[in-house]
Amino acid sequence: MKQPKYLSLFLAGTLVLGGVAMKQPKYLSLFLAGTLVLGGFAPTFVAAETNETVVDTTAPEAPVVETPLHTSTSLKITGEVGTKAEILVANKTYERVVRSTGEAIFTMSPQPVGRVITVRLVDASGNVSEETRVVVAEDPEQRPEAPVINTVDNSARAIVVTGTPGVGVTVTVGGSTFNGSFDANGQYRRVIALQKVGTPLSAQAKAKSGALSELVQTTVVADKVAPAKARLTQAVTTTSNGIAGTAEPLATVVVTIDGKAYSAPVMSTGKFVLPIPKQPLGKKMTLAVRDGAGNYSASETLTVQHALFNNFYRVTEEEFRAVFHKEVFTWDGSTRYNETFAPFFIDRPSKSNMLFLLSNYTEDGDVVGFNKLRIRVGNATYTEAIDEWDVDYYEYEDGSVEESYWFIPSAKMIAFIKQHVRPENRIVITIEGYDYDVEWALIAGEKRAFIQSLQYAGY
């Protein structure tokens, strides 16, 4: 048995009890220098009295430290009573005393998984025990949710993993490793090169505490799905030197003209611009989308349109088809301004299909009572009578009223417009009514509507 230290001042010999040798209590060392025999054993000699003090040089045994989890808020240390426990955590040292229970409790904040904590004991004489090291372990009940790897095929240019917002994630693609975190929507996206079928993929979430989720593993699969057709931003016209639109991100768009193929990549945003030479009116070409796995979308035939094609809306409602200039009309054919005088087309743009609309909208419900149209450019004036029976009236639920009159232009009016309507000229339109007159000057967009509509019709 280990002798109590307080005996060290008295005994320096060996005490034998019942045939068993024991280390003598130090407090007997002041009186005995020989061997004390009890129970029939004779002593060999007796030590002479001395005043010499014996110094304690026996180190405490190494402490026993309970392994903490990453969620633990305290550390339990067991060791020799009365010793001082020195705890080294994150390069800082803390001290706690081992109580009469043989335990010391160190309160701490939760530590990350893998952090090493070192503990040693120091007694009153300064003797230091061996160090005990423990490593912070993961609390299995607090592991983050396992991430989900979205399907990655051999045409994919990105890998998308979903998980808990704000949590870190480690993703491996083949031999490459990427680290990041899930965004506010719980998504992590990484652009990657094209991968072969069967390439291993893995993802593992990592909390700020260092706790790891289950490791999720999968592989790259074959892409057998053809991409959707491309959607053009604008039609191809005689003035176009490229084709713009949207298609499957990171795919390739291919256009074929007279057997010659032109191609361009689709950006990660899904937008593309494919340069081509200018083509004549009516020229046909085919457009298709090819993904990274070599799958092709259905081909689409494009026809080169008039140079002004993209400046007009095309409205189709049941059997009604019309073409309206974008600067005067909206996408559904309604007018942009309270007072409107502008050309439009029934069916397709041509001289025979051109009509003119004259309309007036009033919020107070007052009716002008159309009687005459007057167009004035400087000193030049064109007038045309309006049959009141040809005027339409529409009253809205809020009490406002719209009067409208549409008609086929005469050759004389077309000639006047061609001669006088210029961007730099001030053009004043007047509706003379039975009740009152309405007058306004055409703005730049309305002038362009006149000029471009006549050009589109072939004038």
Image (cartoon, helix red, strand yellow):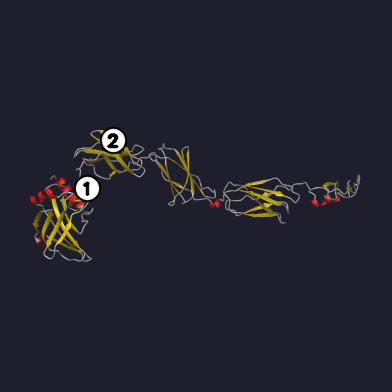
Residue 26 can be seen in this image: yes
How far apart marks 1 and 2 lie (CA) works out to: 26 Å
Q: Which residue is mark 1?
A: 311
Mark 1, residues whose alpha carbon is within 10 Å: few (<14), some, or many (≥20)? some
Work out which residue is located at the far front of the displayed protein and give it: 379
Relative to residue 175, is residue 433 drawn left or right?
left
Q: Label 1 sits on what residue type?
A: Asn
What residue is shown at x 9% (from left), y 54% (from top)? 382
Q: Earlier in the sequence, mark 1 or mark 2?
A: 2
Relative to residue 126, is residue 18 drawn left or right?
right
Work out which residue is located at the far top of the displayed protein and give it: 259
Q: Residue 50: image x %, image y %?
A: 89, 48
For the residues bearing labels 1 and 2, Cβ distance under 8 angstroms: no
Q: Helix or strand or loop: what does disc 1 sit on?
A: helix
Whether residue 152 is situated above or below residue 103 in the rendered picture: above
Q: Residue 260: image x %, image y %?
A: 26, 33
Residue 152 can be seen in this image: no
Question: Considering depth in this image, is 268 or 453 the residue closer to the camera?
Answer: 453
What residue is shown at x 47% (from left), y 51% (from top)? 166
Q: Which residue is mark 2?
A: 262
Question: Considering depth in this image, is 48 or 206 the residue closer to the camera?
Answer: 48
Q: Quadrant of residue 272?
A: top left
Q: Label 2 sits on what residue type?
A: Tyr
Please give the label number shown on residue 245: none
Mark 2, residues whose alpha carbon is within 10 Å: few (<14), some, or many (≥20)? some
Task: Name the quarter where the C terminus is drawn.
Answer: top left
Q: Residue 65: image x %, image y %?
A: 66, 50
> Which marked residue is nearer to the observer: mark 1 or mark 2?
1
Q: Helix or strand or loop: what does disc 2 sit on?
A: strand
